[in-house]
């Protein structure tokens, strides 16, 4: 029983992959974690960002190594540059980019459909519908990649990556010998050699299409001919439950489109329905082939599909009225429970300190994104990895009256915060940048990065200093603070905001969730001393429960960071003896 | 080899709680127990942002042939909840004849502490209205008595095991496979207490 991600790692192992790279991102993270943990034969690394990861794997492939690179959908935006041209210069060892989409935005800032990138870069696309297929199609993708010398994309979604189902395993086969063969007309796309490559990409696409036509990954399941469903990925599973009687064309090798197979299928059913998640990728192509079909009119195109949503699609398709919305007697009565900064989180103190200042805070992607929620509400924008730094600079240059603070995490700083910092110095900005350094990539489940001093396999390595990078970028005002000392943190932020030059504040304390221990002694509230001022509640700590003016600290949750004790004007919060 | 049951219908179970309560481990054990019994199993869980102290749900489906890893509304045979409000939040997943097993614990969310929402005072009344078949288990208290408050998840699993057609030995074997040696006995005990209280 493996998750889709574990099955991909297993497939990579069996297919003789020797290099695996990536940058963590839900829902893709566990692919590389599993490959590194269980397959010591495979060189694995967390790269600083997806572009680097992609290029490292590409370099390995050019020398003949079978390689995979893993990332979430937005990570491929970062790696789009090497993708587009690796398609031209071609690969030597099989090369697969394993990209996980997040329909429904469970843990992402947007919803995007990676299938478009396959068409954009003219590379083959594989879409598993369960864990067994995740293993099988990764192996197939590697062999197609190697045979046709093209990078390939394996696209999963949250429900494929994070669902578990049984997988039959095989033995590992070894790849070819590693030896880079010099061949500039093949690997150097300066125009004189690049133009023939351009033509080769189109020719290759035709060859791949012929392969997709007869690939066992694309299959027709004949049942009733009155309705034929064209589908792929997890949507296949939902469609089978909702239309058990319908014939199905199930695409696993889904780009280039197997036009012949589509025509053959469509020609023998009365009505064609395309069931796919997110963009009308297949539907538009089927229509472009001149085949009448339906899809978006009945199947929703935003947020993830489910059996429930397709039951509604079926009603509409059959000309029935939409099901009446049933009244929900409970939901309005329930308090929302959004994700929050954990008890003891080192980011909390910084956001509290920022909440006392009249500043604009441009934020970034990570656990600290949660600082945007009430009661802290101290993050004013989020765009993408690294934008917390560069947008601060842009807002300052716009003439915004308030001071602008950019907030970025440690892993995100290494990912793409450094170039923004350079820009601030180079173009004479004044922004204050705070790196919330909790010594790990926390949100995705605590992965190492260039600052932690450990590799993906736990080996000690150089711990790159954020302060040194700041100084090397030309920042004079670089300082480190302890986020659990509230007064010091507030003082430091005030001083740097007042400075007429750029500042870099590194707020450093390890994530207690990763350390698996409390920050300090658990705190408790002495009821008789408490004046019910509720100042402690402004920290937004889930361990402090306030009900009808009575504050208490949940002893099962308190991580002992002591921020509430520092804040309490009545001195009612104390350390618990022996805790 | 354990005799394969003749149950044809796909069983759906929804486990809910607050991030950090151990819903994922409980889900893993349930799936393992069903696999030992020879069923096809699919589970689903949410990682990342959704885990940080927020409301969490895991879904398990097992049977002869399982397609979707997601449980449809009004189709779960069992809803297991480690927190009272969370049970209500996911009420519509349960079939009308389904069993709700709820740990009688209340965890106050930050939205309540900050005054923007209220924890319903009549939560037990609402639970009784939502679930015709409702059992409570004081999993948190029983787990503390057993010596580790973190075993509440396995206590709850014991309680819902009564409503499923998986034999005790599959459950025990699954716990053995999913839980580290050091905590095995504790968890086996927690399971058995939960099973006897339901």
Image: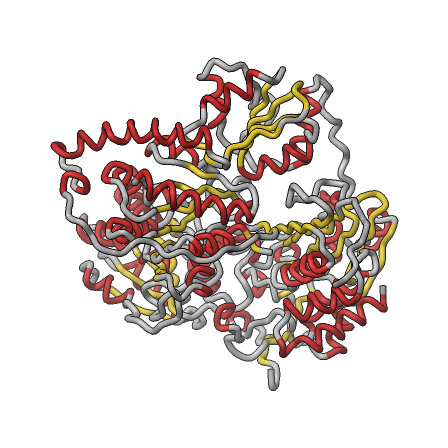
Residue B31 occupies quadrant: bottom right
- Vertical relation: A523 (above or below) A194: below
Q: Nearer the viewer, residue B6 or A329?
A: B6
**Left or right placement of residue A344 versus residue A176 in this view:** right
Q: Nearer the viewer, residue A383 or A576?
A: A383
Q: Where residue A440 appears, x then y in whole percent?
A: 41, 64
Considering every residue shown, the one lying at the far left of the view is: A192
Q: Where residue B78 appears, x then y in whole percent?
A: 78, 52
- Residue located 17% across and 51% down the image: A426
**Left or right placement of residue A399 versus residue A266 in this view:** left
Q: Which quadrant would the C terminus of chain A be assigned to in this image?
A: bottom right
- Vertical relation: A213 (above or below) B52: above
Q: Where residue B183 appears, x then y in whole percent?
A: 65, 76
How did the renderer colour the structure?
A: secondary structure
Q: Nearer the viewer, residue A427 or B8?
A: B8
- Residue located 61% across and 52% down the image: A166
- Residue located 85% across and 69% down the image: B196
In the rendered image, is residue A497 in sight?
yes
In the rendered image, is residue A547 in sight?
no
Q: Which quadrant would the N terminus of chain A be assigned to in this image?
A: bottom right
Q: Where residue A533 appears, x then y in whole percent?
A: 61, 64
Considering every residue shown, the one lying at the far bottom of the view is: A578
Residue A83 occupies quadrant: top left
């Amino acid at each position: 029983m493996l998750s889709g991600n574990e099955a991909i790692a297993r497939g990579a192992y069996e297919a003789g992959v020797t290099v695996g790279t990536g940058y963590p991102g839900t829902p893709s993270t566990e692919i590389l974690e599993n490959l590194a943990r269980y397959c010591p034969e495979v060189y694995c690394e967390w790269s600083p960002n997806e572009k680097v990861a992609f290029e490292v794997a590409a370099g390995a492939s050019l020398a003949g190594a079978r390689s995979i690179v893993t990332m979430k959908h937005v990570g491929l935006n970062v790696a789009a540059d090497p993708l587009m041209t690796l398609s031209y210069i071609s690969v030597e060892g099989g090369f697969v980019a394993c990209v996980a989409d997040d329909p429904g935005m469970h843990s992402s800032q947007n919803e995007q459909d990676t299938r478009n990138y396959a068409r954009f870069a003219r590379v083959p696309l594989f879409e598993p519908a369960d864990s067994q297929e995740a293993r099988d199609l990764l192996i197939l993708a590697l062999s197609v990649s190697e045979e046709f010398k093209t990078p390939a994309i394996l696209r999963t979604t949250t429900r494929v990556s994070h669902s578990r189902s049984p997988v039959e395993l095989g033995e590992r086969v070894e790849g070819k010998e590693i030896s880079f063969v010099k061949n500039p007309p093949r690997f150097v796309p300066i125009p004189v050699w690049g133009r023939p490559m351009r033509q080769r990409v189109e020719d290759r696409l035709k060859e791949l299409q012929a392969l997709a036509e007869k690939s066992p990954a694309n299959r027709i399941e004949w049942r009733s001919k009155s309705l034929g469903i064209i589908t792929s990925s997890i949507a296949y599973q939902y469609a089978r439950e909702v239309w058990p009687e319908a014939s199905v064309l199930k695409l696993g090798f889904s780009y280039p489109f197997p036009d012949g197979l589509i025509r053959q299928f469509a020609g023998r059913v009365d009505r064609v329905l395309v069931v796919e998640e997110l963009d009308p990728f297949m539907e538009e192509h089927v229509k472009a082939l001149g085949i009448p079909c339906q899809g978006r009119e009945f199947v929703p195109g935003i947020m993830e599909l489910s059996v429930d949503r397709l039951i509604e699609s079926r009603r509409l398709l059959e000309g029935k009225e939409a099901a009446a919305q049933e009244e929900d007697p409970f939901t309005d009565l329930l308090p929302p429970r959004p994700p929050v900064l954990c008890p003891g989180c080192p980011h909390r103190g910084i956001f509290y300190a920022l909440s006392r200042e009249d500043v604009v805070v441009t934020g970034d992607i990570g656990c600290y994104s949660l600082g945007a929620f009430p009661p802290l509400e101290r993050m004013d924008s989020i765009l993408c990895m690294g934008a917390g730094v560069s947008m601060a600079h842009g807002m300052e240059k716009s003439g915004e009256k308030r001071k602008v603070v950019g907030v970025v995490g440690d892993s995100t700083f290494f990912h793409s915060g450094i170039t923004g910092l350079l820009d601030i110095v180079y173009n004479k900005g004044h922004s204050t940048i705070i790196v919330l350094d909790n010594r790990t990539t926390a949100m995705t489940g605590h992965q190492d990065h260039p600052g932690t001093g450990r590799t993906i396999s736990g080996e000690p390595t150089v711990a790159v200093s954020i302060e040194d990078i700041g100084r090397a970028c030309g920042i004079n005002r670089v300082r480190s603070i302890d986020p659990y000392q509230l007064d010091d943190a507030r003082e430091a932020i005030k001083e740097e905001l007042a400075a007429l030059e750029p500042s870099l504040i590194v707020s450093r304390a390890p994530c207690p969730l990763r350390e698996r221990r409390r920050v300090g002694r658990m705190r408790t509230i002495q009821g008789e001393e408490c004046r019910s001022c509720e100042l402690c509640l402004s920290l937004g700590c889930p361990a402090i429960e306030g009900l009808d003016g009575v504050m208490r600290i949940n002893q099962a949750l308190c991580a002992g960071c002591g921020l509430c004790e520092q804040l309490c004007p009545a001195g009612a919060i104390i350390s618990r003896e022996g805790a | 080899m354990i005799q394969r049951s003749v149950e044809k219908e796909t069983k759906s179970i929804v486990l809910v709680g607050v991030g950090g309560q151990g819903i994922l481990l409980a889900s893993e054990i349930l799936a393992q127990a069903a696999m030992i019994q020879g069923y096809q199993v699919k589970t689903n869980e949410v990682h990342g942002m959704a885990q940080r102290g927020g409301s969490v749900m895991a879904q398990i489906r097992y049977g002869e042939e399982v397609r979707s890893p997601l449980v449809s509304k009004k189709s779960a045979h069992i809803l297991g909840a480690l927190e009272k409000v969370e049970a209500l939040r996911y009420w519509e997943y349960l079939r009308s004849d389904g069993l709700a097993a709820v740990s009688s614990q209340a965890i106050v969310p930050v939205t309540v502490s900050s005054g923007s929402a209220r924890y319903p005072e009549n939560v037990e009344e609402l639970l009784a209205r939502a679930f015709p078949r409702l059992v409570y288990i004081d999993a948190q208290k029983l787990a503390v008595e057993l010596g580790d408050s973190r075993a509440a998840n396995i206590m709850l699993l014991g309680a819902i095991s009564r409503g499923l057609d998986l034999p005790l030995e599959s459950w025990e074997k699954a716990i053995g496979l999913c839980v580290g040696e050091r905590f095995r006995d504790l968890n086996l005990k927690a399971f058995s207490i939960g099973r006897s209280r339901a």
